[in-house]
Amino acid sequence: MAQRGGVLDQFCSQLSSVHVGEPIALDGVSLFPLCWPEAEPSPVDLYEEALERGDVELTEKGSGDVPEIQLHNHGTRPILIPEGALLIGARQNRVTNATVVVAARSVFTVPVSCVERGRWSWRSKQFAHGWYAPPSLRAMKSRQVHESLHSEGRPHSDQMRVWGGVASFLAARRAMHPDDDLASAYHAYEEEPAVDAGELLERLPPNTAGLAVAVEDRIVGMDLFDEAKKFRRTFKGLIAGYLTELLWRTGQERREQADEHEPPPAPAKDLAERFFQRVKAAARVRPQRIGISEEIEIDSREVVGMAVLYEGRICHLAAFAG
């Protein structure tokens, strides 16, 4: 028990050391860069990079099982697959339910949810990486996974509610698709992107390892990796997940209010620091691990999410307003 309690102490101590940078304002949305005090080599590889190298395969489990797929790690290093990642192809598109670290040279069953209700047919043998799900869907799904783990011992979501969330998201953005495919909203976003992801990335400090994202005076969510390289690799898909939802929301609110005034100034960075305090207060060590890492469950009325620590380091933290 002392060792497990020490994991929570490590998590809170490391989170307290994160430096919050000055926010970047984007039409009612503010991005706070998150940086570690020192850069250290990571003990795990990101699954996106491993996919490109051919070290990892993501496939259906057998002939297909909606809440589970398989990750085949052929490489010599552990693999990190973050919560909220959209996986495109195979028999239907999915989103990962939890952040996990997968051992080298192993086959692992990844818990997922379907985000393409109308298709159950082969499009490809393997899944490809897409984007990251919007924060509202990630928050809802994370809470469902916590409840499922405690009640059933399985990291599953409420699939009907996930489908309902996807349908509502697509309808609000007029990105309807015959298969209720969440990816259709991202295709529409990329046709007329609200921001240039490459230019935005260059505005962030080079050692940025994560972001806290706010709408006016409220943090909506945050993603933090253990190194800047992982963050830069995920940035385009990650920021699409946030902005596809949040820039539409802030623009819609202004249209409804017919407000011709300038958008409010970016909030002070202590907004993100206060969010960190809520994350730490809601954190507890997950009693039943999913992968090979130590896993933190974040769950309160105010905030929900999860984190993994491997070899004593936070490899990924995702947290959202509750």
Image (tube, helix red, strand yellow):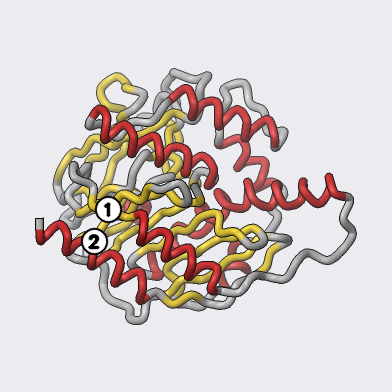
Residue at the image position 44 percent from the left and 77 percent from the top: 19
* Near-viewer residue (116 or 134): 134
Residue topped by disc 2 = 8
In screen coordinates, is 283 left or right of 34? left
Amino acid on which disc 1 is placed: Arg
Task: Check disc 1 and report its element: helix, strand or loop.
Answer: strand
- Which residue corresponds to mark 1? 284
| Proximity of marks 2 and 1: CB atoms separated by less than 8 Å | yes
* C-alpha distance separating marks 2 and 1: 7 Å
Q: Amino acid at mark 2?
A: Leu
In the foreground, 281 or 265: 281
Secondary element under disc 2, as helix, strand or loop, is helix
Counting from the top left corner in percent of width and height, residue 193 is at 69, 52
Q: Residue at image x 24%, y 59%?
A: 309
Q: Quadrant of residue 268?
A: bottom right
Identify the residue at image location x=63%, y=62%.
217
